Image (spheres, helix red, strand yellow):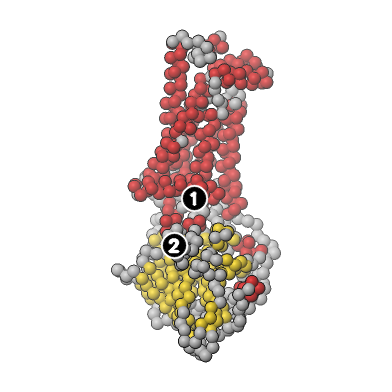
Amino acid sequence: MDNLRFVLIVLFLWLSYEIWHQWQEDYGPKPPVSAVAGQNRPVDVPVTSKPQETQSSTVANASSMPEETLKAGQRITVTTDLLKVEIDAAGGDIRLIDLTTYPKEKDKPGDPVRLLNDDPRQLFISQSGFIGEEGMVPNHLSEWKTNQTEYTLGKGQEELRVPLTWTNDKGVSVTKTYVFKRGSFLIEMEQQVSNQSPSVWKGRQYTQLQRKQPEKKTGSALSANSADRAYVGGVLHVPENKYEKISFDNMKDKDISQDGKNGWIAMIQHYFMAAWIPPADEDLHFYTKSLDNQKFVIGVMEPTAEVEQGQSPVFKSRLYAGPKIQRVVENIKPSVEGAPPLDLELTEDFGKLTIFAKPVFWLIEQFHKVFNNWGWAIIFATIVIKALFYKLSESSYRSMANMRKLQPKLAALKERHGEDKQAFNAAMMDLYRKEKVNPLGGCLPILVQMPVFIALYWVLSEAVELRQAPFIFWIQDLSAKDPFFILPIVYAASMFIQQKLNPQPQDPIQAQVMKWFPLMFGFFFAFFPSGLVLYWVVNNILSIFQQAYITKQVEGRSALFVRGGTSGPGASGGGPKDSSA
């Protein structure tokens, strides 16, 4: 059964490798696609004089978006407590968003993360407008006017409204207003259509995100920077098909055209996202488009609206542009009460073990509320997790202690049977049955903790809450590797001590290989987030104390049997001396 322990530990290594491998498969660099579908197709100007609510015309509307040629116009700067935004009058769209409370690097607080950016090399912008009869509707290429070029959310001010206007010579005017609120990354957009023309105005509001595919990183799978491995691309969410990732390669292969209700679209990246959230309970059309120069669009259209002469309805949508903080995005509610939840928290993607990752993150978050330090939160969450598994671990360590107690007898059996492995294995199984020892029991701690280990890996890799989160002393970012490799060294030392408490393999080759495991795991963990290694170090230290205590209990009880002169199968204390004599 020593073989089983050896295989299970190797399995642990293999599963850990598979985490990296699967991450690379899902989010890592892919080979370039030689044939790019739809990049050179002609793009029509918006001409939809009589749009019909059918699937065929819906697709036609999606293909009749205006050309994606950016124009530069007058810039409007908006500053809030969380955002610095630039809106371009050419298109009336948000071209730049700086997340002023999130620096790119911890030691450079004046250099914030730029989420939206109209730099052609890093293009990522939001766009909006209407599709309808040419000249009767504004789109993201239309010229808008503004009376003010700088807006600042003042002290004590809770809301900031930024209006832009578009008019034609037929009596139609549209006022697009962006609404910013204190303490919020959610931007509301209102488009009020005033129809003073003699005819019925028809238009279909759309909102979309356009992004140039980022240059693909080709770093090693052992890279400590989880951003190098994170998914960057589109997301389409509807209640029937939640959180569907649409990669840039998917968009290259074909344009997506899909109808639905109560959904949203997004472009996400490591820690941050931009998402358009249309009104709830409306018939929506979702689409993607592949443009030239590695640019891609994901968007959503609302139903065709008719505005009678003299009417001025308002069409709304919402843009979230900020970090993927669970407690923030899960509080964004649908625009209609009773509609299905938006589930925006799914963008903080914890992988296939979300069922474990969610409660693990919740537990860590509760301790963070107490200590205001994510490192201490991880330590105390580890103690709680260890307490939850205590009885199961106790059973396992007791089995391992009994196995350790049998080592002299097993050595004697091996000496007696020599190279006859079949006879040795049969005698070993008889000994286990006689002593009522379960050799499988010692393997359970590794297997039981595996889901928690993987879940915590995803939490520390994906949770923006832990981004640049300091612990103490040299660890100033729990989401990055230990800069001095102190925690991996401590982990390797703790694993070495644990090995001394475990029963040793009878096979000398396995015994030699096992001696290298602490070093191998120490190297392996050197590239993991320091928060994850901190969890494993604390878990190992707790396990050492628990296992040492249980081993002492088992060996002490055995000595009592010997001193009391108890005979029979339970009197195993004197067995080893007799067997080896």
Residue 145 percent across, percent down from the top left: 45, 82
Residue 379 visible: no
Q: Amino acid at mark 2?
A: Ile
Q: Is residue 410 above or below residue 509?
A: above
Which disc is residue 461 wearing? 1
- For the point 49% across and 24% down, the residue is 401
**The C terminus sits in image quarter:** top right
Q: In the picture, residue 543 is in which quadrant?
A: top left
What residue does disc 2 label? 332
Going from N to C along the chain, the mark reached first, 2 or 1, is 2
- Nearer to us: label 2 or label 1: 2
Q: Badge 2 local density, few (<14 within 10 Å), some, or many (20+)?
A: some
Residue 173 percent across, percent down from the top left: 47, 84
| Cα distance in 3D space between marks 2 and 1 | 24 Å
- For the point 42% across and 30% down, the residue is 545
The kind of secondary structure element at disc 2 is loop
Q: Is residue 554 above or below residue 452?
A: above
The kind of secondary structure element at disc 1 is helix
Residue 11 percent across, percent down from the top left: 59, 37
Q: Is residue 336 above or below residue 513?
A: below
Q: Amino acid at mark 1?
A: Ser
- For the point 52% across and 37% down, the residue is 448
Q: In the picture, residue 259 is in which quadrant?
A: bottom right
Which disc is residue 111 wearing? none
Q: In the picture, residue 390 is in which quadrant?
A: top left
